[in-house]
Image: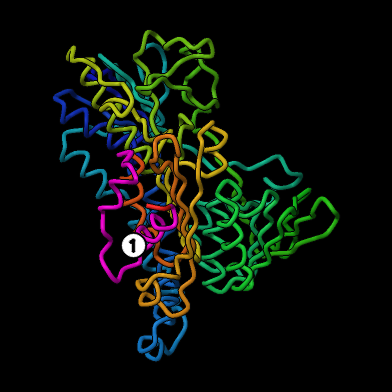
C-alpha cells in the first residue's frame, strides 16, 4: 500500500471532476483524481455527445427536406450504419486515452480504481489488480461521482435485462420494436432517435411527455412522435416484465394489457453513485444524494458541515441540477472556492458571486433534442407562480416571423416569455421549434443579467432571422 498527499483529492473524473481539478491547479494547488471507469464520464460516452450524434443525422435530413432546392437533392433515407459509426466516433469508441492524456498535460495525476472515503480527508483506492493506494487531502475531498439510471422495483424487470440510457446510446443494432418506460428527456430523445432509425417505438409515459415543462412543450413533442409512428401511451404503467425464450420482452400493464418488444429501455430517473463510497465512515448514508451548502460543502442530516467543511460534492451527486453544463458550472465555483479558502482569500458566496452556483436556482438552460427541439431557461410559468412572483405570460407563434419562413417551409414553433411584473425582467423563457437550441443563450443572458424589458427593447434582432421573435414578444408585451 502506498500513501500520497495532495491539496485536493477528487473522486470521479467525469466533466465535473475534470473541471474541479483544472481550477485547482490553475489556482496553484495540487490535485489528484480517482476514476473507476472511463475518464470523461457519462457525458462523453453514454449521454450528451453520443446521444446528440444519434439524433443529429435525422435532424439534418428533416431540415433539408423542408427547403425546396435542397429537398430535391435528397434521394435516400438515413444510412443507419453511418449514423452508428459517427456516434462511435463521438464516444471515442469508448476509449479514454485522449481525456486521460489531458489530465496528464495539466499536471493532474490519475488514479484508476474504486475510491472510497476511509476517514476524514482520506481516500482509499482499490485498483483492478487489487492493490491499494491511499490519498490524503490537505484541504478538501470533492465527490463528483455522478448518477446512474434508476431501475424501479417492477416485477421481473431486472431479470429481463432492460436497457438503460447506456445500452440504448451504445446499441450496435437497431431493434425492430423498442418499448420505453418513461416520458422525460431521455425517453423522449431516445423515442425520437430510434423512430428515426427505423424502430417501431412504444412509449409508456405514465406521467405524460416532458411533464415538468410547460404543457404546450409535451403536447407538441407527443404530437410529433405520433406523426413518426410512435405509440405514445400517456398514463400507461408497467406492472410486470418478462424476457421470453425467444429473447423478446413482454410488458404487462397495470390494466392487464400486454406490450411486446424486442428491447425495453427504462428511462424514469437517476440515482446517485454513492452506494459504495465510504459515506458511512464520515457520518453519511450510503446510497444517498449529498446535500450541500451554497459553496457545495456537504452537510449532514442535522444541517451541519461534515468535518467542519473539508468534503464537497459537485454535479449530479448533489441533485441540484442533473445537467452536465450545470455540473461544470458548479465545478468551477468549487475549485475556485477551495483555492480561496486554502489561501485565506475572501469567499464571494453571495447571490451571483464567483463562489456561488446561483444559476442552479434561477437560470438553468436546457435543450431537449427531440423533434421539435425544446430550449428553455429559468422558471416555467407554473414554477414562477409557485415561487410567489406576480408574473405575466407572453406567448408568440414562432412561425410568424420572416426568419422562420426562410429557415424552412412549414416551420412550426412557439415561444413563451415569463415576466416578473414587479421588476419587469424575464424569469423564464421557452422555445419549441426546429433548431431553437441555438437561440437559447440570448435568453439565458437576459435572465442571468436581469435585463429590464425597457433595455431589451434596444437589443435589435438582425433581420431576417428567427431571433426576430424577441421583437415580437416585446411588442406583444407592450414595449
Q: Residue drawn 27% across and 34% down?
A: 110
Q: Residue at x 37, y 18 (%)?
A: 311
Residue 126 in view here: no
Left or right, 9 with reference to 27? right
Region rendered in magenta: 449-477
Q: Is residue 81 above or below residue 87?
A: below
Above or below: residue 339 compared with residue 331: above
Residue 193 inside the magenta-drawn segment: no
Give the image location of residue 302, x and y in percent.
53, 10
- Residue 152 % position (x, y): 67, 41
Q: Which residue is nearer to you in this view: 464 or 408?
A: 464
Which of the 4 image quadrants contains residue 421? top left
Q: Which residue is mark 1?
A: 467
Residue 427 lies in quadrant: top left
Q: Residue 373 appears at what percent x and percent y? A: 46, 61
**Residue 75, horizontal then vertical, whole percent:** 42, 90
Please tell me which residue is depicted at 31% across the width and 21% down the height of the picture.
350
In the foreground, 63 or 57: 63
Amino acid at each position: 500500500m502506498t500513501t500520497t498527499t495532495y491539496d485536493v483529492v477528487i473522486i470521479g473524473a467525469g466533466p465535473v471532476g475534470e473541471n474541479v481539478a483544472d481550477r485547482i491547479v490553475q489556482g496553484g494547488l495540487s490535485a489528484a483524481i480517482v476514476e473507476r471507469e472511463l475518464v470523461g464520464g457519462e457525458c462523453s460516452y453514454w449521454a450528451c455527445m453520443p446521444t446528440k450524434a444519434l439524433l443529429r443525422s435525422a435532424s439534418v435530413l428533416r431540415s433539408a427536406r423542408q427547403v425546396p432546392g435542397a429537398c430535391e437533392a435528397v434521394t435516400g433515407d438515413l444510412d443507419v450504419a453511418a449514423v452508428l459509426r459517427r456516434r462511435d466516433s463521438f464516444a471515442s469508441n469508448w476509449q479514454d486515452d485522449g481525456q486521460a492524456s489531458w489530465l496528464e498535460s495539466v499536471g493532474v495525476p490519475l488514479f484508476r480504481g474504486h475510491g472510497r472515503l476511509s476517514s476524514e480527508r482520506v481516500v482509499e483506492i482499490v485498483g483492478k489488480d487489487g492493490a491499494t493506494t491511499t490519498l490524503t487531502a490537505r484541504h478538501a475531498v470533492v465527490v463528483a461521482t455522478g448518477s446512474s439510471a434508476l431501475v424501479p422495483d417492477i416485477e421481473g424487470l431486472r431479470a429481463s435485462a432492460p436497457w438503460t440510457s447506456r445500452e440504448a446510446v451504445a446499441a450496435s443494432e437497431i431493434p425492430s420494436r423498442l418499448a420505453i418506460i418513461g416520458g422525460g428527456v431521455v425517453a423522449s430523445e431516445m423515442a425520437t432517435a430510434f423512430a428515426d432509425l427505423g424502430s417501431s417505438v412504444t412509449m409508456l409515459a405514465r406521467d405524460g411527455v416532458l411533464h415538468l415543462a410547460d404543457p404546450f412543450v409535451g403536447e407538441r413533442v407527443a404530437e410529433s412522435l405520433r406523426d413518426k409512428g410512435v405509440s405514445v401511451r400517456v398514463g400507461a404503467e408497467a406492472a410486470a416484465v418478462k424476457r421470453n425464450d425467444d429473447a423478446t420482452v413482454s410488458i404487462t400493464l397495470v390494466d392487464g394489457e400486454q406490450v411486446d418488444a424486442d428491447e425495453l429501455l427504462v428511462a424514469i430517473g437517476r440515482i446517485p453513485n454513492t452506494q459504495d463510497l465510504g459515506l458511512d465512515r464520515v457520518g453519511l448514508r450510503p446510497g444517498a444524494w449529498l446535500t450541500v451548502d451554497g459553496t457545495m460543502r456537504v452537510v449532514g442530516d442535522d444541517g451541519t458541515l461534515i468535518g467542519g467543511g473539508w468534503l464537497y460534492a459537485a454535479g449530479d451527486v448533489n441533485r441540484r441540477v442533473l445537467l452536465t453544463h450545470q455540473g461544470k458550472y458548479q465545478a468551477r465555483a468549487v475549485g475556485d472556492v477551495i483555492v480561496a479558502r486554502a489561501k485565506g482569500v475572501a469567499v464571494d458566496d453571495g447571490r451571483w458571486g464567483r463562489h456561488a452556483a446561483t444559476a442552479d436556482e434561477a437560470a438553468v438552460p436546457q435543450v431537449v433534442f427531440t423533434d421539435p427541439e425544446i430550449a428553455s431557461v429559468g422558471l416555467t410559468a407554473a414554477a414562477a407562480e409557485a415561487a410567489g412572483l406576480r408574473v405575466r405570460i407572453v406567448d408568440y407563434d414562432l412561425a410568424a416571423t420572416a426568419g422562420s419562413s426562410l429557415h424552412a417551409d412549414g416551420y412550426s414553433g412557439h415561444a413563451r416569455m415569463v415576466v416578473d411584473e414587479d421588476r419587469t425582467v424575464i424569469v423564464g423563457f421557452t422555445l419549441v421549434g426546429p433548431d431553437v437550441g441555438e437561440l437559447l443563450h440570448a435568453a439565458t443572458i437576459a435572465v442571468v443579467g436581469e435585463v429590464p424589458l425597457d433595455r431589451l427593447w434596444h437589443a435589435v434582432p438582425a433581420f431576417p432571422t428567427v431571433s426576430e421573435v424577441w421583437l415580437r414578444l416585446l411588442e406583444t408585451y407592450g414595449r
